Image (tube, rainbow, N blue to C red):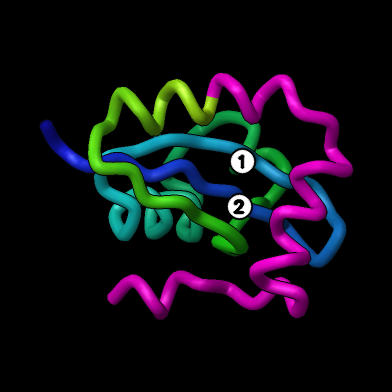
């Protein structure tokens, strides 16, 4: 088993959000921040790591991501606001 992370990136407070899953959050957040991943997060400038959740197993993290992809936007915003009301970038806390 290897750990997994479910995370939300944003372009600004209450802006566009991107939901993802990875086994290496520091590396993945770095890639988003520097525009190294083509697609939605790069197109919408989602560079702020505003929320993440740690799982013991990457498969658990993938299940959680699939569950959250069905959520309404308001539920994801509430999740961020409860843990990170200022929408501060949590990238530095990973290092």
Question: Measuring 29% from the left and 54% from the top, which residue is drawn there?
Answer: 27
Where residue 3 sits, quadrant-wise, is: top left
Left/right of residue 76 with respect to residue 5 in the rendered view: right
Q: Looking at the picture, tell me which residue is in the foreground, 47 or 62.
A: 62
Q: Does the magenta stretch include residue 33?
A: no
Label 2 environment density (alpha carbons within 10 Å; few <14, some 14–19, many ≥20): many
Q: Say whether residue 9 is left or right of residue 25.
A: right
Q: What stretch is highlighted in magenta?
A: 66-95
Of 8 and 58, which appears nearest the observer? 58
The mark found on residue 9 in the picture is 2
Residue 58, labelled with which disc? Answer: none
Residue on which the image places disc 1: 41
Whole-percent x, y for residue 79 in the image: 71, 54
* Residue 11 location (% of width, % of height): 72, 58
Q: Where is residue 47 in the image (x, y as percent from the top left)?
A: 59, 59
Residue 48 sits above or below residue 89 on the image: above
Q: Which of marks 2 and 1 is in front?
A: 2
Describe residue 4's horizontal placement relative to residue 91 as left or right: left
First in sequence: mark 2 vs mark 1: 2
Q: Do the residues labelled 2 and 1 touch (CB within 8 Å)?
A: yes
The residue at 66%/24% (across/down) is: 69
Which is more toward the observer, 52 or 46? 52
72 w.r.t. 86: above or below: above
Is 82 situated left or right of 91 in this image? right
């Amino acid at each position: 088993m290897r750990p997994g992370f479910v995370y939300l990136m944003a372009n600004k407070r209450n802006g566009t959000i991107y939901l993802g899953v990875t086994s290496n959050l520091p590396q993945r957040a770095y890639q988003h921040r520097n525009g190294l991943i083509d697609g939605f997060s790069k197109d919408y400038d989602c560079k702020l790591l505003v929320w993440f959740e740690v799982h013991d197993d990457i498969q658990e993290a993938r299940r959680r991501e699939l569950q959250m992809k069905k959520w309404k936007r308001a539920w994801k915003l509430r999740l961020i606001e409860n843990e990170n009301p200022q929408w501060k970038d949590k990238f530095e806390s990973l290092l």
